[in-house]
Amino acid sequence: MKAVHFTSDSLHSHTGKIWSVRLTFRNVTYLQLLRVECTETQYCGLIQSLPKLEAITVSEISIPNYLERIEEIASLSSQNTPEEVRKGQTGPALHTLSVGLKNFCDGILLSLFASRRSVARMGALKQIYACAPTNEPFFCGASVVIALSVFLELASRHGVRLHVGNLLPVRGIALPPLRIPVNMPLLSIICNMVLTDNYKTANSIEWFISTFNNVSHPTDIESVRINVSLAITILPWDRLPQRGGDAASISQWGALDEALCRPEVRLEGLLIHVQPAGPLWMKLIDSVARWLSEVCLPKAREKYPSATPGSTVVGHNSIEEPFKRWRKD
């Protein structure tokens, strides 16, 4: 057996006794925990009993012990340097970490994975998914971004692909920028955004802007992909705001355009991928793609020739790959 899945259940037997997972499934390489309720002891015991675990997907998990200590755990990833975290972690070495950010406990687990108290080692990570299986927003504090920055530092020796969801700050407090390592051999960032009726974004575009504005040394990034999901009604090309007209409607996109073209930011590829909300939205893709390319991101379009809206070079469903098994639930 190579994979174990727990969905909409708890790690208890029908008799009420704790289900023992110690020394079970020693050859398992993939674990999925979806809408699972368990104790801290059960969760840690399950991970520790899978010594060959390489990939884990968790979402909507509930661990009361962690929820009672939100502030304490949220600060763990900022208490040590990335190198101290690397040396202090024990357990199986993960290559893929997928946390479907749906509730508070998911955010807590992300912070734990980025700390010395992680139940698995993160130094060999190649792919990180910190996003819901859809483009719905996740309201979070600085701890989530700090954890992502720690993951990048831990993977700075070999490189990593980061899939980050629609992050929004709690109570309007701006999220800190993501710290991108300077000498990372391979980094690919995939970010979700939502285009709404006011032509702006109910999402993390400001955080994305601050991340690239924070790059202080020449940094090579293999690719950046921005998935733009449509959440709009009627949007024909001739009614989209243009530069020199309703400039306020595209000011955020203009700021992103400037940030992506800073001399310190050196991208090998930039992909803007428009995702329809359903079959009826397919006719809007060309108009929105043209608008994003020619009006919103003209400098990036000129600097990075590969910035073709609608491109599927990375793969249309790559952002949701770890979640495809349970999207029907």
Image: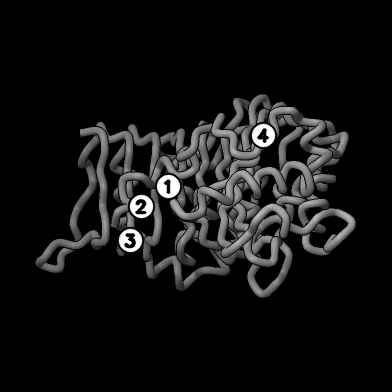
Q: Which residue is mark 4?
A: 308
Q: Secondary structure at mark 4?
A: loop
**Residue 295 location, x and y as percent?**
79, 47
Amino acid, disc 3: Arg
Please, which residue is most extreme toward the left here? 15
How far apart are the alpha carbons under marks 4 and 3?
37 Å
Q: Is residue 108 above or below residue 261?
A: below
Q: Quadrant of residue 182?
A: top right
| Of marks 3 and 1, the one in the foreground | 3
Q: Which element is circle 1 on?
A: loop
Residue 42: % across, % down: 29, 57
The amino acid type, in three-letter code, at marker 4 is Thr
Instruction: Work out how far the residue at label 1 is from the one at label 4, CA to CA, in angstroms.
Output: 41 Å
Q: Residue visible at 31% across and 50% down?
A: 326
Q: Nearer the viewer, mark 4 or mark 3?
A: 4
Do tag 2 and tag 1 residues touch (Cβ < 8 Å)?
Answer: yes
**First along the sequence among labels 2 and 1:** 2
Q: Tag 1: residue type? A: Val
Please give the label number shown on residue 35: 3
Q: Please name whichever residue, 183 or 103, is drawn nearer the observer in this view of the structure.
A: 103
| Residue in the image at 33% along x and 55% along y | 34
